Image (cartoon, rainbow, N blue to C red):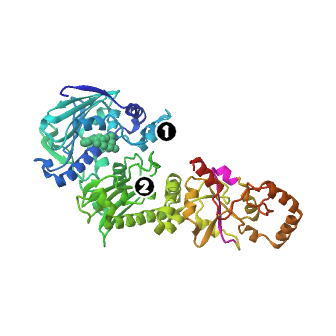
């Protein structure tokens, strides 16, 4: 169509816009970070496409982002000479949210500003954050390789609709003009913008430029020279040496790659040399993304080859149980034209994955050892995901097992902070196994009648109720040569822990109760394998136990619920 067309935002976009304007107000300068971040992504994409099609760079090969303002018109403009957008791309990118799980996410919003602001932080606000400070946003774009006549202009006041129309655009790329709200005059100054840009984009690997100014003695004021100058260092952060990078820069870089609002919990930055050569800068977030349990959700590690961005969401770079990790891996060995298919087969990628998994585990071990409070935050956020490692990564099972934390009868609380090593250090004389109970909730676990005998004998039992636990226990069968044993299974060795007197009592009781046991055996014969007298109960009259080799009742219920 050659004329202007008006369209409505997707319902979720409308909700996002409304919430954002009302709940992120105290964070409003983030719009600049988001827009510069998008501009930098767009340049990365172009550089990648230009590997095969150098003509896309036209006569303008130096990729950069520019920020300018016009105090009279009350506008701030962010422009890039990156990949640009076609009409269709602009309509879908700036009018809908395509991520899976978006609808569920929005149904969790409560109307409580503070809570919602946090949730939105997890979701990532991106381009739409422009409307925190602007009452009208104009985007002009032309895709690299398209003729100047195929430019497109998108415009909206952020209320519910946007318009698109064709325009002539000579320069490739995207230019976003924000018309500021009345009260946002602050952003109409060179000093203020430079200050924010330095803070938010110093890690960006291409130049972020502003108009160059010089002191004009006669006029006694700063005057523009007509040139542009960089306000950032413009070298990829991960290529710099650790000692040249400040904590602040690491944190900002994290926010750029992760789309998170909050600081990361920890990071690891290494240059690996040897059989395979690469640099990794990997972060552990403080908060879970809303789609952590969505198996198809995007992964957070970006792949670069010799500083050229290759792809987001490169799932081969880390095992699935470390999918919460965000960051960058830059390989010196892979070909620039590497595809997802090649990644799957590549030996270099396998060695990157193994090396990166080990680095992340070291980072977690260090946190568990030296920053216990942070580790507790990590565990409550990502512990359930890490548990998947016990089955998924046999070569690191022992390291993962050491990182696990459980609730236990020792603490009598639902806080998961007992390690297997803690448990082993408290094992009783003669105790050979690590005991646990699985149930559907903490309360069900701690009230299990199976625990009575253990409590009486002062033997600690781990309390497990996370969904993944049964699955984990089918892989994790021992720790430091001590078997993990369910308190609900078979003969156990608790009876072995009984003293002689109790054993004598048991055989006497068994003798005297034989008629009752026989009658119960007869009447329950279709339902149970065996009825017997036990020492394991203290207060409850009876309980059901599972044979050593059978499925636990909790797992049976889960399979049943899953329709099996
Ligand atoms: P995200 O960056 O997380 O994908 P955004 O809301 O920030 O989400 O941006 C949405 C999409 O719009 C981007 O994925 C990209 O496809 C497109 N986009 C935004 N800004 C630009 C730009 N400057 N150049 C090209 N495409 C852009
Ligand atoms: Mg973005």
Q: Tell me the distance, in whole angstroms, between the alpha carbons under discs 1 and 2.
A: 25 Å
- Asked if residue 374 is positioned above or below residue 126 in the image, the reply reads below
On residue 199, which mark appears?
none
* Magenta highlight range: 431-446
Question: Circle 2 sits in a helix, a strand or a loop, which is it?
Answer: loop
Q: Is residue 231 visible?
A: no
x and y, in percent, of residue 73 in the image: 21, 29
- Asked if residue 436 is positioned above or below residue 23 in the image, the reply reads below
- 233 horizontally vs 532: left or right: left
| Residue labelled with disc 1 | 115
x and y, in percent, of residue 486 in the image: 65, 62
The quarter in which the N terminus is drawn is top left
In terms of depth relative to the viewer, which is nearer, 432 or 215?
432
In terms of depth relative to the viewer, which is nearer, 521 or 460?
521
- Asked if residue 485 is positioned above or below residue 382 in the image, the reply reads below
Residue displayed at 36% across by 38% down: 97
Q: For residue 470, what is the image quadrant?
A: bottom right
x and y, in percent, of residue 238 in the image: 30, 59
| Residue labelled with disc 2 | 323
- 271 horizontally vs 524: left or right: left
Question: Circle 1 sits in a helix, a strand or a loop, which is it?
Answer: helix
User: Is residue 442 part of the magenta span, yes or no?
Assistant: yes
Tell me the mark number nearer the camera, choosing from 1 and 2: 2
In terms of depth relative to the viewer, which is nearer, 254 or 334?
334
In terms of depth relative to the viewer, which is nearer, 246 or 44?
44
Q: For residue 196, what is the image quadrant?
A: top left
């Amino acid at each position: 169509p050659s004329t202007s067309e008006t369209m409505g935002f997707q319902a979720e976009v409308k909700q996002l816009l409304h919430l954002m304007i009302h709940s992120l107000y105290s964070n409003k300068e983030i719009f600049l970070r988001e827009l510069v971040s998008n501009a930098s992504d767009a340049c990365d994409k172009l550089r990648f496409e230009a590997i095969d099609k150098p003509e896309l760079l036209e006569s303008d090969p130096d990729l950069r982002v520019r920020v300018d303002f016009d105090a009279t018109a009350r506008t701030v403009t962010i422009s890039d000479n990156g990949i640009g957008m076609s009409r269709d791309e602009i309509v879908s990118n700036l009018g809908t949210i395509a991520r899976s799980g978006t609808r569920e996410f929005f149904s969790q919003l409560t109307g409580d500003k503070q809570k919602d602001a946090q949730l939105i932080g997890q979701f990532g606000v991106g381009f739409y954050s422009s409307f925190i400070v602007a009452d009208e946003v104009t985007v002009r774009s032309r895709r690299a390789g398209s003729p100047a006549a195929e430019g497109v202009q998108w415009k909206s006041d952020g209320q519910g609709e946007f318009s698109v129309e064709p325009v002539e655009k000579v320069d490739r790329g995207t230019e976003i003009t924000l018309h500021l709200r009345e009260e946002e005059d602050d952003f109409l100054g060179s000093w203020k913008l430079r200050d924010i840009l330095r803070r938010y984009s110093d890690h960006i690997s291409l130049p972020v430029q502003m108009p160059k100014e010089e002191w004009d003695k006669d006029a006694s004021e700063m005057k523009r020279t007509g040139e542009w100058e960089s306000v950032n260092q413009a070298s990829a952060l991960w290529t710099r040496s650790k000692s040249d990078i400040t904590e602040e820069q690491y944190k900002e870089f994290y926010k750029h790659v992760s789309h998170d609002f909050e600081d990361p919990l920890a990071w690891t930055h290494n240059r690996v040399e040897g059989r395979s050569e690469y640099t990794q800068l990997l972060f552990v977030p403080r908060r879970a993304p809303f789609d952590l349990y969505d198996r198809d959700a995007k992964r957070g590690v970006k792949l670069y080859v010799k500083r050229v961005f290759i792809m987001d969401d490169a799932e081969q770079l880390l095992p699935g149980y470390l999918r919460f990790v965000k960051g960058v891996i830059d390989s010196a060995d892979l070909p620039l034209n590497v595809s997802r298919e090649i990644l799957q087969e590549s030996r270099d990628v396998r060695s990157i994955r193994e090396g990166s998994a080990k680095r992340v585990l070291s980072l977690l071990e260090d946190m568990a050892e030296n920053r216990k409070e942070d580790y507790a935050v990590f565990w409550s956020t990502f512990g359930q995901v890490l548990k998947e490692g016990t089955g998924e990564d046999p070569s690191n099972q022992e390291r993962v097992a050491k990182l696990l934390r459980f609730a236990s009868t020792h603490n009598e609380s639902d806080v998961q902070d007992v390690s297997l090593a803690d448990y082993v250090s408290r094992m009783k004389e003669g105790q050979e196994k690590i005991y646990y109970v699985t149930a559907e909730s903490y309360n069900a676990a701690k009230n299990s009648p199976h625990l009575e005998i253990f409590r009486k004998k002062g033997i600690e039992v781990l309390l497990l109720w996370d969904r993944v636990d049964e699955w984990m226990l089918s892989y994790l069968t021992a720790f430091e040569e001590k078997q993990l044993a369910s308190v609900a299974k078979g003969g156990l060795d608790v009876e072995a822990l009984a003293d002689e007197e109790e054993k004598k009592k048991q055989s006497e009781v068994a003798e005297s109760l034989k008629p009752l046991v026989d009658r119960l055996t007869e009447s329950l014969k279709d339902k149970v394998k065996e009825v017997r007298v036990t020492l394991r109960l203290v207060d409850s009259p009876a309980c059901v136990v599972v044979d050593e080799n059978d499925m636990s009742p909790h797992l049976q219920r889960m399979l049943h619920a899953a329709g099996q």
